[in-house]
Image (cartoon, rainbow, N blue to C red):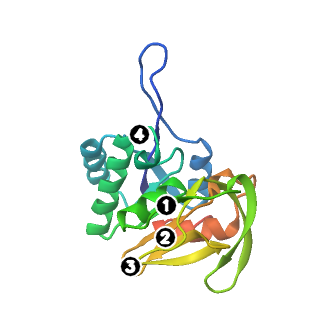
């Protein structure tokens, strides 16, 4: 059992003033297919880091949902938590995967600007990988990068939009599509996520 920390959305207060964190239920099935067990983390940086240490997490997943606060998103506390989790993981050689918004966290942590992009919300489109491979992915983002600084490198694009990255030295990667939202999980995603975060995928 490989435990990975999973970040969550912060929902607005309900009619009783109660605030909740939320995680797409499909993540549980996808991570199970990758041989991983999720540990949902709160959007409170100190508590999230204590949880990560106490659980001896072997990976961190920065999930999607909502823009970063600097681009109009509603959860600056989530941004702070995810940036600290990213630093915590890199300092300990714990692998990190950022998905959609999570990849944007990785991009901003390394100084890559995000810009509005059209035609990337609730659509499917092809991506071309750095080795010339092609596949179709889902897309639910309105902000993206067109270039990345070192030590990041681009591993997939859709036209001039960066769709996937990896760190040249640390075990950090990001993808802009949502593997958990596929009706049938793509075997490439299962293999890649399992390999990065230590699960190895279904046997």
Pointer 4 residue? 75
Task: Name which of mark 3 and mark 1 comes first in the sequence.
Answer: 1
Pointer 2 residue? 196
Which residue is nearer to you in this view: 85 or 115? 115
Task: Name which of mark 3 and mark 4 comes first in the sequence.
Answer: 4
> Is 152 positioned to the left or the right of 116 in the image?
left
For discs 4 and 2, the disc positioned in front in the rendered view: 4
Check if mark 1's residue and mark 4's residue have beta carbons within 8 Å.
Answer: no
For discs 1 and 2, the disc positioned in front in the rendered view: 1
Label 2: how many residues lie within 10 Å, few (<14), some (14-19) or many (20+)? some
Task: Name which of mark 3 and mark 2 comes first in the sequence.
Answer: 3
Pointer 3 residue? 151
Whole-angstrom CA distance, mark 3 to mark 2, is 18 Å
Can you say whether 136 is above or below 168 in the image?
above
> In what element is the residue under mark 4?
loop
Give the image location of residue 124, x and y in percent. Answer: 75, 59
Task: Name which of mark 4 and mark 2 comes first in the sequence.
Answer: 4
Pointer 1 residue? 114
> Is 2 positioned to the left or the right of 146 in the image?
left
Label 4: how many residues lie within 10 Å, few (<14), some (14-19) or many (20+)? some
> In what element is the residue under mark 3?
loop
């Amino acid at each position: 059992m490989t435990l990975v920390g999973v970040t969550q959305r912060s929902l607005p207060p309900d009619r009783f003033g109660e605030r909740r964190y939320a995680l797409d239920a499909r993540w549980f099935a996808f991570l199970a297919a990758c041989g991983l067990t999720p540990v949902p983390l709160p959007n409170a940086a100190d508590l999230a880091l204590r949880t990560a240490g106490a659980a001896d997490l072997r990976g961190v997943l920065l999930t999607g949902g909502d823009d970063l606060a600097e681009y109009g998103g509603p959860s600056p506390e989530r941004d702070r938590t995810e940036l600290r989790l990213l630093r915590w993981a890199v300092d300990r050689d714990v692998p990190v995967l950022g998905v959609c918004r999570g990849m944007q966290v990785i991009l901003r942590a390394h100084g890559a600007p995000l810009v509005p992009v059209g035609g990337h919300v609730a659509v499917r489109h092809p991506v071309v990988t750095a080795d010339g491979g092609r596949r179709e992915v889902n897309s639910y983002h309105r902000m993206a990068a067109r270039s990345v600084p070192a030590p990041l490198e681009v591993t997939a694009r859709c036209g001039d939009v960066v769709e996937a990255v990896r760190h040249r030295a640390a075990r950090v990667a990001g993808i802009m599509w949502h593997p958990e939202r596929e009706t049938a999980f793509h075997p490439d995603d299962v293999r890649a996520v399992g390999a990065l975060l230590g699960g190895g995928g279904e046997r």
